[in-house]
Amino acid sequence: ETVLTQSPGTLSLSPGERATLACRASQSISSSYLAWYQQKPGQAPRLLIYGASNRATDIPDRFSGSGSGTDFTLTISRLEPEDFAVYYCQQYGASPMYTFGQGTKLEIK
Amino acid sequence: EVQLLESGGGLVQPGGSLRLSCTASPFIFSNYALTWVRQAPGKGLECVSAISGSSRSTFYADSVKGRFTISRDNSKSTLYLQMSSLRDEDTALYYCAKLRGSYLSSAFDMWGQGTMVTVSS
């Protein structure tokens, strides 16, 4: 079973700063099958990145994804107030078919 | 605008059954795989089941295998999740989501607002 571990658990930053969120897989996964989601309180998750580096529809270009093998990164180049939320990585190809990381909470410092 | 609307949640006793529904509009429903993802209060996300556009392929998490059944009626643009032998640990907000493609190996690009299922005596 592929386990995804996200770090840090909580990240405290200020608007305007750069955020780097990590997702490590317990075994190598295809970068084609790695996604990132944003979830704000009381809302459903929203797809940000699929295929490790492809922005979903209407996602601002300050969000970018990278990585391969077992190590993946979501970068937010310059934080806006609306970016403070919980972020999840997900793999959707290996067995079992879908697993999520435990999430990183991005909070305002 | 693509929308997904879940219904059917509620309070049920342990061992009971419940059927969730998710109606979709307006997209070519049969072209896309769909999934149910749950989130226990204050916890993370768990995909419990998924079904391809043609219904030929399905996925179940080990935690629900043999108890939950996913199905879809493309003529009604509706997704279902039949849940039986419910346990306390099935208590969660259940989201319906659309995948980017018709096969199961796709990210989830559209989500409903969820329906709450509470299993308690």
Image (cartoon, rainbow, N blue to C red):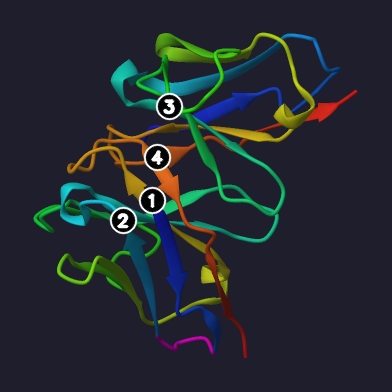
Q: Quadrant of the C terminus of chain A?
A: top right
The stretch of residues the image draws in magenta is: B13-17
- Amino acid type at mark 4: Asp
Dots 2 and 3: beta carbons under 8 Å? no
| Residue A9's disc number | none
Q: Earlier in the sequence, mark 2 or mark 1?
A: 1
Percent coordinates x, y for residue A38 in the rendering:
59, 35
Q: Are marks 3 and 1 in contact (CB under 8 Å)?
A: no
Marks 2 and 3 on same chain = no
Distance of mark 4 from mark 3, alpha carbons? 8 Å
Question: Are circles 1 and 4 on residues that touch, CB within 8 Å?
Answer: no
Circle number at residue B109: 4
* Residue wearing tag 1: B2
| Residue identifier under label 2 | B26
Q: What residue appears at the point 57 percent right and 50 percent down from the top-left corner?
A: A44
Instruction: Name the secondary structure under disc 4.
Output: strand
Whole-percent x and y of residue A99?
A: 42, 40
- Say whether disc 2 or disc 4 marks the residue closer to the N-terminus: 2
Disc 2 + disc 1, Cβ < 8 Å: yes
